[in-house]
Amino acid sequence: MEKFYKIFQKNFFPHRKGEYRGSLPLITISREMGSGGKSTANLIASQLGKPWKVYDHELIDKIAKDKVLEEELISSIDPKRLPLADIVTTKTFGKRFAHLSGYQRHLIKVMTLVGLKGYSIILGRGGNFLFPHMLNVRMICQLDQRIIWQMTYEHISRPEAIKRIEESDKERRDFVESLFNHNHCKAYHYDLVIRTGSDITIEDATNIIIDLAKRKFKI
């Protein structure tokens, strides 16, 4: 276990002087509905190019439910790194991991594998709590702007937009609290918090995150 922990430290923790070590860059984006987080993640992946890929909650859930997709993900990872998956979960959850539901444990396994694969952008699902030393971003937006964007892009009424936002905020808060015992709204869980709106566009957010990623990961 001590040997594995040293390997984990080398690959996942930055150098004391801030220099990133390893070849597994990872970005996590926690976001409010209507803040532009998904669009930002897709723009980042597009601008950074292959092998960068976005893993949102739909794709992560799909992999967790499909054995073939999970095996494809595993095959894309250096076999020498696979033992790190257990170290990540142990470090994050400790003995509590055994008491999570089967689905929760499987979901965490998939997210951990995505992190081990590297060159990934994990959108939501509390990815920053699994990989606290990667580049972790929180995207927020004023409520009025969130409502307007939901109405515009989803072609829904104002009451429906408000309803969806309230339900989404609750679902995401409850998910993270039940799985990680943390409040995902707290700024200190992230390297950067971006409030999108009239002053900071999706393109601005994308450029800021890419600049930080290039500095952190030397890419």
Image: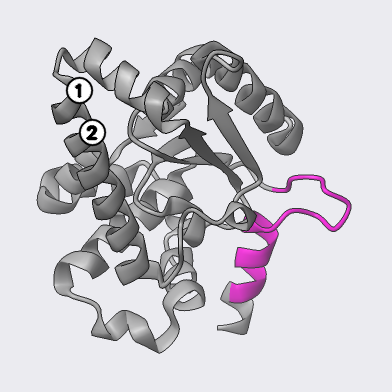
How far apart marks 1 and 2 lie (CA) works out to 6 Å
- 146 within the magenta span: no
- Decide if residue 123 is on the left or right side of residue 151: right
* Residue at the spot 25% in from the left edge and 43% down from the top edge: 166
Q: Which mark is residue 158?
A: 1
Mark 1 and mark 2 residues within 8 Å of each other at the beta carbon: yes
* Residue at the spot 50% in from the left edge and 21% down from the top edge: 44
Find residue 210 and report its image quarter: top right
Find residue 136 and report its image quarter: top right
| Colouring used for the render | one colour
Quadrant showing the C terminus: top right
Q: Secondary structure at mark 2?
A: helix
In this view of the protein, which residue sits in the foreground, 164 or 56?
164
Residue found at the far right of this picture: 17
Magenta span of residues: 5-21
Q: Which mark is residue 162?
A: 2
In this view of the protein, which residue sits in the foreground, 99 or 146?
146
Q: Please say whether residue 29 is visible from this viewpoint.
A: yes
What percent of the width, then of the height, locates residue 179?
A: 33, 68
What percent of the width, then of the height, locates residue 203?
A: 54, 12
